[in-house]
Amino acid sequence: MERLKLAKPALEELFAREYPFQSHFFGPDGTRMHYLDEGPGEPLLMVHGNPTWSFYYRGLVQAFRGAYRCIVPDHMGCGLSDVPDDDHYDYTLKQRIDDLEALVAHLGLENELTLLLHDWGGMIGMGFADRHPAMIKRLVIFNTAAFPLPVGKILPWQLGLTRTWLGEFLVLRLNAFSRIAARVCCRRKKLSPNLRQLYCAPYQAPDRRLATLRFVQDIPLRPGDRAYAIVQGVASRLDRFRSVPTLICWGERDFVFDRDFLEQWRRYLPEAEVHQWPNGGHYIVEDALEEIAPLIQAFFDRYPVEVNSHGRVR
């Protein structure tokens, strides 16, 4: 297990208990991407957003690694991955999709995948799926998007502020984005102070906060934004996934990915099985893990994937 720089022994103990996983690293272009690879069986690829990291999926990994292969990357600049500067890494959606594609190839995941997607992970994961639609066996979606802002929506002011010079100062100097998210993104079951510290731990040093800022700056709002064409292209082809079994677990008290985003998913994937938590927040897996894990297992049972004795999907 890769170690974080944690100030208190109590945090070290909590991290060891909450994140009892072996760290792995993949080195595209001289940088190190950290990822988890836990368990046998068919692969479940879990893609996180901003400002979370693989820690967000720890409960699902522990729930499923006995029977499934749980692969959870930390995006470059996030979690336990390296944090290259702008001269050595292109912090864009295209590059994020390229990274995920490279990791899948590195791991030899040449057959069908189940994608679990949250926040920016939705756009990154569905960007990968758009390139390799035949590989996608199932989708599990948590408070995310893979399409432009729904009609009539505007960027919440909190994210708009983060895109200004003041927001840049607050994120890079004070770690404001990660710290505030850890406080407000759980609505049903607030994170304890120690868990909030673990969520923020990879971003404690100022030189490790660049990715959290670049993600917000890369949000595509209008034609001409550098990620907009990718997002619009993926959205235009989402109908290819209408027949892919899809489970949507949604926290309704999300100030960004609200009910309008959920309704957009319903329009794109009308056959999806949807579960909503009226008092759930953006970090819905934290808010409702005890309910979500059995729902996912039941979903997997209804749509099984055959795996041979070598752990490869047939």
Image: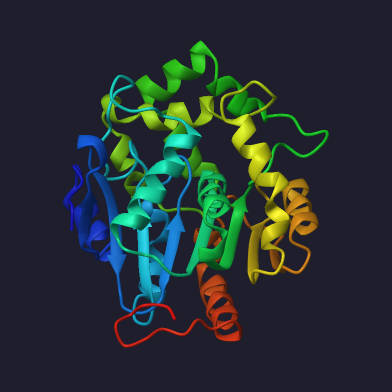
Question: What residue is rendered at 33% in x and 80% in y?
Answer: 311
Residue positioned 54% across, 55% down in the render = 129
**Within the image, what quadrant is residue 239 found in?**
bottom right
For residue 118, side relative to residue 260 (left or right): left
Q: Is residue 143 left or right of residue 239?
A: left
The colouring scheme, among rainbow, by chain, secondary structure or one colour, is rainbow
Pick the quarter of the image with the N terminus.
bottom left
Q: Quadrant of the C terminus?
A: bottom left
Tell me residue 242's x, y (percent). 72, 64
In terms of depth relative to the viewer, which is nearer, 72 or 124? 124
- Where is residue 235? Give x, y as percent: 69, 45
Residue 252 visible to an observer of this rendering: no
Count the numbered circles shown: 0
Indicate the position of residue 265 as horizontal and vertical percent values: 73, 54
Position of 192 relative to 77 (above/below): below
Q: In percent of the image, x 50 and y 81: which residue is there? A: 305
- Left or right of residue 195: residue 298: right
Q: Residue furthest top?
A: 165
- Residue 192, position as x, y percentages in the image: 41, 53
| Residue 230, placed above or below residue 271 | above
In the displayed orientation, state which residue is furthest to the bottom: 309
Q: Residue at x 26, y 41 (%)?
A: 28
Q: Is residue 298 visible?
A: yes
